[in-house]
Image (tube, helix red, strand yellow):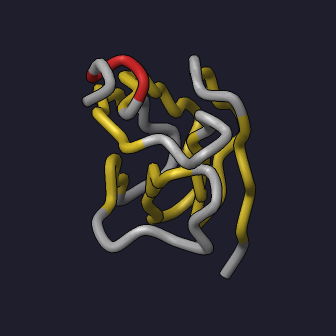
């Protein structure tokens, strides 16, 4: 059995300067989407942060999917995909 470090990633995600409501999903890198949000925001100009434990894909990647609008993101994750409604 492999070490837990080989199968999971920890991330700290911070979103600032939000615009309206939205959410951020963290998923394995090969996932098209995730089933639960990691961060939620409900109005303009919020700063929200959270930690995440996410399974890695076979290439050891994770992805973040932003649904909504933010003007600034900071993350230790390898990729950030912006999606708009």
Tally of numbered tags? 0
Q: Is residue 75 left or right of residue 83?
A: left
- Residue at 42 percent across and 24 percent down: it is 6
x, y (%) of residue 8?
36, 31
x, y (%) of residue 74?
61, 21
- Residue at 59 percent across and 46 percent down: it is 58
Viewport quadrant of the N terminus: top left
Q: Nearer the viewer, residue 71 or 61?
A: 61
Q: Nearer the viewer, residue 65 or 3?
A: 3
Q: Nearer the viewer, residue 37 or 61?
A: 61
x, y (%) of residue 22?
47, 64
Q: Is residue 37 left or right of residue 12?
A: left
Q: Residue furthest bottom?
A: 85
In the displayed structure, 19 sits above or below 11; it is below
- Residue at 69 percent across and 29 percent down: it is 78
Q: Nearer the viewer, residue 31 or 58?
A: 58
x, y (%) of residue 76?
57, 17
Q: Is residue 12 left or right of residue 36?
A: right
Q: Residue furthest front?
A: 1
Residue 79 quadrant: top right
Viewport quadrant of the C terminus: bottom right
Residue 54 quadrant: top left
């Amino acid at each position: 059995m492999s070490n837990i470090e080989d199968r999971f990633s920890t991330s700290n995600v911070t979103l600032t300067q939000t615009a309206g409501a939205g959410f951020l999903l963290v998923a394995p890198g090969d996932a098209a989407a995730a089933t639960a949000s990691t961060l939620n925001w409900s109005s303009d100009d919020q700063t929200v942060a959270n930690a995440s434990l996410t399974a890695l894909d076979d290439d050891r990647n994770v992805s973040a999917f932003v649904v909504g609008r933010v003007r600034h993101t900071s993350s230790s994750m390898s990729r950030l995909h912006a999606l708009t409604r």
